[in-house]
Image: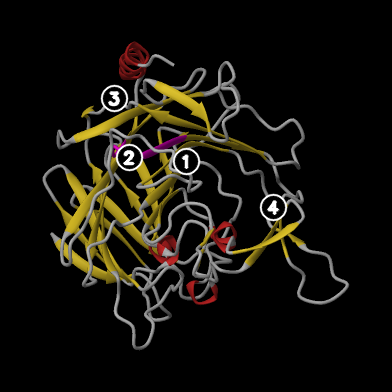
Amino acid sequence: MSFEFKTYGSDTQTFSKRGIGDFNLSCSHIQGDPEKVFRIYIESPCGLNLEITPSKGMSLRDCSYQNRQMFWEAPMENLPDPEQVNIMSTVICDGTPIPGLGWIKYFASHVEMMGLQNWGMDRKMDDGTHFPLHGNISNIPIEKITVKTLDDRIRLTGSYKVYGSNSIFPVSGNSPDFEIIKQIDIFSDKPVISQKDTIINLTKNTVIPDWGYHVQLRPEPGCHYYIPAKSVEERFGEPVPDNHNEWKSADVESIREERGYIYKGLLVESAFSDKTDGVRTLLKYNETPGIEVILPPSPFTLGWYSCGGGMGDNFTIPANNPGEKPAKLLTKNWDGIGPEIGASDLDHNGNTDPAISAGTLKPGEKMSIKLEFRFLDKEKELALEKNILGYSTY
């Protein structure tokens, strides 16, 4: 079975279909979301439920299985309007107005692809070019999705084109730089999500796509995120503390805290469901079975920990009128844990793993990047933890 449906625009039709193979699928509009923005919901026969946000480049959002949640609770309840997105806009960070941080205002999904001219921190070049934080691609809407049922899974596929470093929609008179094909597989007999993103170079030049991913998993106090590696260092060169990979709630709830640790010498093995190479990582909870996240071998691999900030002044939006106070950006705590990976280093200081190189694309060439997410049982969790700790020397 295969069919296509519209996922963005005022003429999008909502629906709920049961019996698509063994799956249920719906397209819904949520109160508070912009008029043209819709969400996709999938129910698998094994009990996994997944939400996909087509207006944010087909990013993954909520996912549950047997009353367990995989991802964080995003600080932004509603999805942004792509027509109003301005990733070059100013955000006030700890009292300092910084242009190019607009991406923060739109971080409403849980697995977002970033880039492709700059996936890391915002960056000003010598020629005056200003690349915004994390790039534009997670805010480009996908207007149509194709659904196909296979023997053991359902597959959703969509695509979009990328114009420049900060445009959301096509720019008149300009040619696109890349096409991205998104493919998401949900399995019928196991709680697993497989994501494959294919980047096609549409330019006339050889390029290195600067791709990245931000994955936000659900934390709880005392949980640990394990990445198999031979070395670890603090993002800004500070000493690595004991239990650096443990998540803790904020000391003061309104004050956001953030930590990051860079891993090198990764354990790359046959990890994905299709037996291709990846890096198997583990989020281990205190009691509940954990979550496995399989990452692509990446030049930059960071374990990311964030907490607090709800209704605080860490991130604010400049006031529209003189005399008004800046508006608080975070209405809820930024409580998250997980990997942040990319083709280059996050802070533009060359701190990458020399054993892993970013891919180069000639005109017309393509590359695929895969991630996989799975809910574990205790037996599989213990085996994965043993494998990671047996390899790691940090």
Residue 336, given in percent of the width and then of the height, sits at: 55, 38
The residue type indicated by label 2 comes to Ser
Above or below 18: residue 276: above
Q: Residues within 10 Å of mark 4 (few under 14, many from 20)?
A: some
Q: Residues within 10 Å of mark 2 (few under 14, many from 20)?
A: many
The residue type indicated by label 3 comes to Leu
Q: Residue at x 35, y 69 (%)?
A: 7
Magenta includes 299? yes
Residue placed under numbered mark 3 in the picture: 267
The segment highlighted magenta reads 295-302
Residue 293, given in percent of the width and then of the height, sits at: 35, 34
Check if mark 4's residue and mark 1's residue have beta carbons within 8 Å.
no
| Sequence order check, earlier mark of 3 and 1 | 1
Q: Nearer the viewer, residue 162 or 154?
A: 162
Direction from residue 168 to residue 132 in the image, left or right:
right
The residue type indicated by label 4 comes to Thr
Separation of marks 2 and 1 at Cα, in angstroms: 21 Å
Circle nearer the viewer, 2 or 4: 2
Residue placed under numbered mark 4 in the picture: 331
| Sequence order check, earlier mark of 4 and 3 | 3
Residue 212, given in percent of the width and then of the height, sits at: 39, 50
Circle nearer the viewer, 2 or 1: 2
| Dot 1: element | loop
Q: Which mark is residue 175?
A: none
Residue placed under numbered mark 2 in the picture: 298
Separation of marks 3 and 1 at Cα, in angstroms: 24 Å
